[in-house]
Amino acid sequence: MPSTLPASLLEVLRCPVTGSPLRQDGDELVAVEDETMRYPIEHGVPTLLPADSAV
């Protein structure tokens, strides 16, 4: 079962690539302006790294 992030957190989070707001879709955050930009939520913590970034 995905954990729901607080609305106050979703209000300030932005897609690191497009800068658009994010909405929660299950266990992912999705950029509002480009739904191909998706970021996982793992153990209640969003990972906002672009897929092509090296850590």
Image (spheres, rainbow, N blue to C red):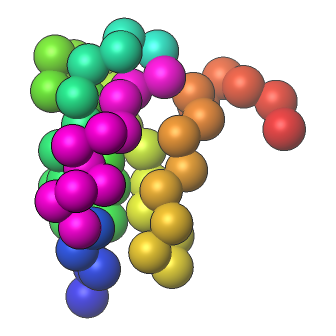
- Give the magenta-colored segment's residue range: 6-16
Q: Is 24 inside the magenta-drawn segment? A: no
Residue 53 is situated, as x and y percent measured from the top left of the image, at 72, 25
Residue 21 visible somewhere in the drawing: yes
Residue 52 is situated, as x and y percent measured from the top left of the image, at 66, 23
> Measured along the vertical axis of the image, is residue 40 above or below residue 1?
above
Horizontal relation, residue 10 to residue 49: left or right: left
- Quarter of the image holding residue 32? top left
Q: Which residue appears at 48% of the width and 23% of the height?
A: 16
Q: Quadrant of the N terminus?
A: bottom left
> Measured along the vertical axis of the image, is residue 9 above or below residue 2?
above
> Measured along the vertical axis of the image, is residue 20 above or below residue 41?
above
Q: Quadrant of the C terminus?
A: top right
Residue 13 is situated, as x and y percent measured from the top left of the image, at 35, 39
Residue 30 visible somewhere in the drawing: no
Q: Which residue appears at 25% of the width and 49% of the height?
A: 10
Horizontal relation, residue 31 to residue 43: left or right: left
**27 or 10, which lies in front?**
10
Q: Which residue appears at 60% of the width and 35% of the height?
A: 49
**7 or 15, which lies in front?**
7
Kindly give the residue lying farthest to the right in the view shown.
Answer: 55
Residue 54 is situated, as x and y percent measured from the top left of the image, at 82, 30
Horizontal relation, residue 49 to residue 43: left or right: right
Total labels: the figure holds 0
Kindly give the residue lying farthest to the top in the view shown.
Answer: 18
Q: Which residue appears at 37% of the width and 11% of the height?
A: 18
